[in-house]
Amino acid sequence: MNAPAAASALSAQAFKSEVKPVWCPGCGDFSVLSAITKALSMLELRPENVAIVSGIGCSSRIPAYTSCYGFHGVHGRALPVATGLKVARPDLTVLATGGDGDGYSIGGNHFLHACRRNADITYVVMDNHVYGMTKGQPSPTTEPAWPSKLSPQGTGLREFHPLVIALAAGANFIARGFSGDPNGVARLIVQAIRHPGFSFVEVLSPCVTFRPDQRSWKEMARPAAVEATDDPARAARRLMTDDGFNIGVLYTGKRKPYAPTATGAAQQPSALEKGFEL
Amino acid sequence: MTTKKARKRAPAPRKPVTEPRERSGAYADFMAQAYTMELEAVQRYTEFAEQMEVHNNPEVAQLFRKLATIEGLHAKQILEEMGWSQAPGPAHAQQWEGGEPPESAPMSEVHYRMTPWHALELALDNELRAEKFFAAIAKSSRTPAEVRKLAAEMADEEAEHVRLVREWMKRVPRPDPDWNRDPDPPFLGD
Amino acid sequence: MNPTPLQSVSLALAGSGGAGVMTAGNMLLEAAALAGYYGLMTRTSGPQIRGGEAAAMLRLATFATDSQDDRFQVLAAIDWQNVGRFAAELPLGPDSVLVGDPAQGEAPEAFTRSGARFLPVPFKALAKSISGGWPNMVALGVLGGLLGLAPAALEGAVRKATRKGGEAMNAGIAAVRLGLAEAAKLEASFPLAAAPAAARRWLVTGNEAAGFGALQGGVRFVAAYPITPATELLEWMAPALTKVGGALVQAEDELASINMILGASYGGVPSLTATSGPGLALMTEALGLGVAAEVPIVVVDVMRTGPSTGIATKTEQADLNIALYGLHGDAPHVVVAPNSVADCLAATQWAVELAESLQLPAIVLSDQYFGQARAIVERPRSEPSAPSRLLAQPDTPDYKRYRVTESGVSPVAIPGARGITYTADGLEHNEKGTPSSQPADHLAQMEKRGRKLASADYAERWATVEGEGEFAVLTWGSCTGPVREAFERARRDGIKARLVSLRLLSPAQPDRLRDALRGVKRTLVVEQSFSGQFHRYLRAEYELPGEVHSLRRPGPLPFHPDEIHRKLLEWSRP
Ligand SMILES: Cc1ncc(C[n+]2csc(CCOP(=O)(O)OP(=O)(O)O)c2C)c(N)n1
Ligand code: SF4
């Protein structure tokens, strides 16, 4: 987190835009939007110093619903856009947001490399275990037996485990939230933004339209029984054995954030002409 | 539900339970929490109203706006009572058992085809939770005496709201069993 | 024998891995440059990563040129292992000579059948006679001797290359001297005419020139995914950016690199990536995003032989279609093409200026020939560009990012600016940037984006136009050098013709071309593409007067001036 704190803190409401969400009433993404705006208020940031980048999907519509600078790009590419922006403008607080399809399927490679690159950005994934925007196809986190039009018998594929993968790939902060507790998600996002390097916040965010069965998440989500660890081996054991419903900060790493920007006085390009001269 | 009814529900200014000089820090803290609770309820109802507007459900949208207005009056009343010119601190300064203030319905509890009856049902749950919330404070032995008294009064008020909403629900038609039916598939794109 | 001095000599030095032919070739080019000549060096190699056969191909001349000549006068080889595979790239004639080490066997039939004479030089044995001596340094001396280059120039090049001095330098100089002495004994010489008046020259590759042009244009962020033949551009930029206060990020793939530059540019920093055909194919979706969201970016495509992975190390002009038409939807953007090694600088700088001022993606179509050719060029004049992005003022009332304006260009808010935050969107949107499926918004934004291209003043930069007459050659990119040289020859035959080499491929400039071709009766279109992509493009976008012929072939062999000259002779007869 780099942007200067505002002289007087803005309310969460001030981080919402005039644009009204197109999401289905009841969608978990409303809570995540609320959580993001609350987090930015808690951090006493100003909208012009925050950039929210996304790909494509229901969840990826978030940037325009905030009063921050937003970038709604193409499907799966939020992380590279956010990385380029953060490297070019280290002064900004940069968030990437999106869905599980966007982040783990089409954007899966970027997810791995964003974790290992460890640029100082916060990645919030609204995981509903489904492709909402394209009307209910299985995503990488969908249960193998879940039937859909495109895979009537279910995919038969084992689920992708984003947190374990993030840990293995080098993410510096790993947390899981549940949209049923927007204030809790807000606190996770605050910590994620404050933590240097690549911070990953996976939010269980039910899709009421295509996964009405996810109503049961309310009963299943519970605070993680143990505190966050900074030991990757312990974190790995915890994440490998967790059932996907432990909520809280699960891992905080100590890696140095990626920052390739040159330091020192910048020369004029003409200084490079020497290399071509005879 | 007519405007007359709405007005009837609007709270009458409460007489301060204690004189200002008697008020402890705990009293102000309690009022700050109550204020945040009302304010968040306003925001939640407003958000629901907007969702219903976007989803072409004007009747329920209007109802949510009314509920927001009523909670807004409660919030204003607290400010006046305390002589505060602005919010007594950021909303996030408050912690709530279960994550959210008792008068804010979970965001998952709305549906684009919901009826006024559903909206009132949701409001009823909010009032019930609020009543329980204040009653628990009123009963707790850890609560300072002057706050206890106030909390009890507020619990009574919420109980009155519960009664009013129940009355209100009697005047609203019950939803059809297939109220959430939509013969068309979702229209999504991107 | 006292042959007449030559204006241009082409030589190649071949050998298998470890022979150091590229090192010696670079030194010869450097020596020629020090002696005041122009020239360029290209390269070819076998498929092996290390140890493969390779040839350095040089043309040294008294005039500036980007073209290879019709034939090589000299082919020297340290050894002949597999060198025969380069026969198509190393055309010889009866006047050519083959210089080889008799201990390495005879020259391959593929070369001797040209009638070229074989001249023996025992490179290995001579090198052995010097402690630390290398055969390639002996060959450098021999080639320098055949050209009549001043020994001081050759030694200067050795000194520069062995910067650390000491043994290597002394051994190198001794070997060069041996080679020079050996050349004097040979029954051949190809003396270059006196060098032209000394001017400030550069020794530069097209890739380096493009990189420098990018910096002059203001680029301070580059995202890179390596691909031949664009890698050297990216590698040149990595340390260069550090010096000018910018940054380079190595991306995980081209999908990432293009999106990274979109992000950086959205943040207000002029940004670029470089790639080749396969990478450009991966980038097309995000190029469309740049068009719709109006984010300026520059993509340099150093074209190689396609389709698919094709021939990674060889040149072709066949990415024209994808660069012009590869984006989905109607996506107006800029495509520029340098038409000389030196022009890689100006064209890339111009692309940055256009991208920034018009707020859109600009593609630079360079190619392997330009990118990897090292040339001695007149020092290009280039000043840093002034920043040209139209910025919105903080707290502008009723700010609309995509406001419909007369020029189509709307002021852009840069993150950090207060009171004018907005969300850039690839979804069709209204003036505020809010997604919209309204036909009226689509039309208004479409027209706005299209209008931007028409609003720019491309001035004289749209093409290189030379000569006059009723006959014209239309070409682009690396075909321009051979065409220009063919024109020179035709002029000596008394043929008048016009050369039009397009530098601005998109947006098309039909009015300008019409003016440039006024009075022309016949047009020859020259390009390096199997299907005639350039010809089809011209047919679609322009009115071409009179009779039109297409001279085309796929890569990787460059056009030679002779074949174009012959075509000119043939066609100019009534
Ligand atoms: C290149 C490309 N392929 C496919 C699509 C279609 N598409 C849009 S959103 C989406 C999946 C969204 O799923 P997810 O990221 O989980 O987000 P959700 O809608 O569930 O929030 C797909 C496949 C697209 N826009 N672009
Ligand atoms: S389809 Fe699902 S994910 Fe999309 S807005 Fe509706 S509930 Fe949310």
Image (cartoon, helix red, strand yellow):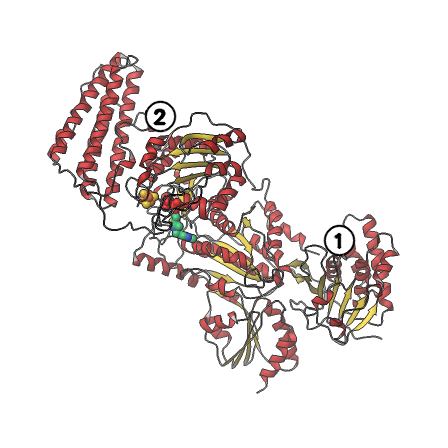
Q: Are marks 2 and 1 on the same chain?
A: no
Residue lying furthest bottom: C574
Contact between labelled residues 1 and 2, with CB atoms less than 8 Å apart: no
Tag count: 2
| Residue at 13% in and 32% down | B168
Q: Relative to A113, say whether C436 is above or below.
A: below
Q: Nearer the viewer, residue C125 or A214?
A: A214
Q: Relative to A120, say whether C354 is above or below.
A: below
**Badge 1 density bin: few <14, some 14–19, many ≥20, Cα 10 Å:** some
* x, y percent for residue A264: 60, 40
Q: In the rendered view of the protein, which quadrant contains the C terminus of chain C?
A: bottom right
Mark 2: secondary structure = helix
In the image: residue C86, left or right of residue C439: right
Q: In the rendered view of the protein, which quadrant contains the N terminus of chain C?
A: bottom right
* x, y percent for residue C117: 80, 73
Mark 1: secondary structure = helix
The residues bearing labels 2 and 1 have C-alpha atoms spaced at a distance of 68 Å
Q: Nearer the viewer, residue A228 or C426?
A: A228
Residue at numbered disc 1: C161
* x, y percent for residue B19: 22, 14
* x, y percent for residue C316: 58, 66
Residue at numbered disc 2: B93
Q: Nearer the viewer, residue C329 or A1?
A: C329
Tell me if residue C395 can be seen.
Answer: no
Chain ID for label 1?
A: C
Mark 2 or 1, closer to the camera: 2
| Residue at 20% in and 18% down | B153
Q: Nearer the viewer, residue C7 or C379?
A: C7
| Residue at 53% in and 81% down | C522
